[in-house]
């Protein structure tokens, strides 16, 4: 399994959070739509949410791993 440097993971986590905030801001300005439009409105930032979850869990598990050692 390929390991990604801790600093790179942190940068990717911050970028993901940045795009999530932009998506939430644009959604709050436009208001929630209905039907297919709601799906397309939300689907734009779903990859960033998944990325933030993955990188956040990796960072958290490394922190726990370092704490145990």
Image (spheres, rainbow, N blue to C red):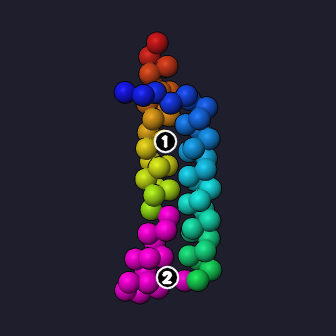
Considering only vertical position in the picture, is 69 above or below 26? above
Which contiguous range is marked in magenta?
Answer: 31-45
Along the horizontal axis of the image, is 51 left or right of 8? left
Which of the labelled discs sits on residue 32, or is there none?
2
Q: Position of residue 37 (x, y in %)?
A: 44, 84
Q: Position of residue 26 (x, y in %)?
A: 61, 74
Residue at the location (47% across, 49% down)? 51
Residue at the location (56% across, 45% down)? 13
Residue at the location (44% across, 62% down)? 46
Farthest residue to the top: give it.
69
Query: Which quadrant is home to the N terminus?
Result: top left
Which of the labelled discs sits on residue 2, or is there none?
none
Q: Secondary structure at mark 2?
A: loop
Magenta span includes 44: yes
Quadrant housing residue 38: bottom left
Q: Secondary structure at mark 1?
A: helix
Q: Are marks 1 and 2 in contact (CB under 8 Å)?
A: no
Q: Position of residue 4 (x, y in %)?
A: 50, 30
Residue at the location (50% across, 64% down)? 45
Q: Which residue is mark 1?
A: 56
């Amino acid at each position: 399994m390929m390991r990604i440097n801790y600093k790179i993971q942190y940068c990717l986590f911050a970028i993901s959070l940045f795009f999530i905030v932009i998506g939430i801001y644009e959604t709050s300005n436009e208001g929630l739509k209905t039907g297919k439009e709601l799906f397309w409105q939300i689907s734009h930032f779903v990859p960033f949410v998944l990325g933030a979850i993955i990188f956040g869990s990796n960072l958290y598990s490394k922190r726990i791993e370092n704490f145990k050692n």
